[in-house]
Image: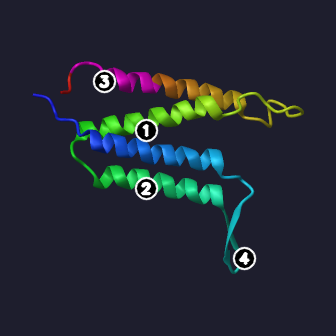
Amino acid sequence: MGTTIHFRTIVWGAILTLLYICTFLFIKSTLVVEFGGGINVNLKLMTTVIGLLVIVFYHIFDRPSAQTTKLSLTTDLTMVWLALILFYPFNPPVGSTSITYPGGAVGFFTLLGGLGLCILWVHFFADEIV
C-alpha cells in the first residue's frame, strides 16, 4: 500500500528554497549588519543561516508523511544543485592559481552531489509511491 503525497508541502518547500537561492545571488558579500558593541555580521552569511534554518524547521514541523518530506527535501536539494551548476564560477579568475581558488574541488563535489541526486530520484521514480 502506498503513501499519499501532499503537494502543498513540496511547493512551499520549493518556494522557500528559491528564496534561499536568491540570498546567494542578490545579496552582496560586502554588506554588514552592525549590532552595536563591535558586533558586525555579514548580511549574506546571516540570511544564509536564517534561510537554512527556516527550510529545516519547515520540514521538521510540517510532517504530512515521511515520503512527502523526503520528496520535498529531494526537490529542494535538486534546486540548490542546479543553482550551483548554473551560477558558481568554476573557472578561476585571471591571476589566481589552482591552489588559491577551489573551483576544481567544488566541481568534483558538485559532480558527486549530482550522482547522489540521481540515486535519490531513482527511489521516487521506482513506482513504489502513489
In whole angstroms, how far apart are the C-alphas of marks 2 and 4?
27 Å
Q: Which residue is mark 1?
A: 76
Q: Which residue is mark 2?
A: 54
Q: Check disc 4 and report the residue beneath it.
A: 38
Do the residues bearing badges 2 and 4 touch, measured as CB atoms within 8 Å? no
52 to the left or right of 12? right
Visual colour scheme: rainbow
Q: Which residues are magenta?
A: 116-127
Badge 3 element? helix
Q: Residue at x 28, y 43 (%)?
A: 8
Number of other residues with Cα within 10 Å of mark 3, as a class: few under 14, some 14 to 19, many 20 or more: few
On screen, residue 36 above or below 62? below
Marked residue nearer the N-terminal end (3 or 4): 4
Which three-letter amino acid code belongs to the residue tagged 2?
Answer: Val
Q: Residues within 10 Å of mark 1 (few under 14, many from 20)?
A: many
In three-dimensional space, the C-alpha distance between marks 1 and 2, rounded to whole angstroms, equals 13 Å
Q: Looking at the picture, how far across and down is residue 86, in whole percent?
A: 61, 29
The numbered disc on residue 123 is: 3
The type of residue carrying mark 1 is Asp
Is 21 placed left or right of 5 in the picture? right
Secondary structure type for disc 1 = helix
**Residue at (27, 38) in percent of width and height:** 7
**Which part of the image, by quadrant, shows the C terminus?**
top left
Q: Earlier in the sequence, mark 3 or mark 2?
A: 2
Q: Nearer the viewer, mark 3 or mark 1?
A: 1
Q: Position of residue 87 (x, y in %)?
A: 64, 34
Q: Which callout, 1 or 2, points at the residue further toward the start of the chain?
A: 2
Please report the residue visible at 20 percent of the width from the left and 27 percent of the height from the top: 129
Gap between marks 3 and 1 measured at Cα:
16 Å
Three-letter code for the amino acid on which mark 4 is drawn: Gly
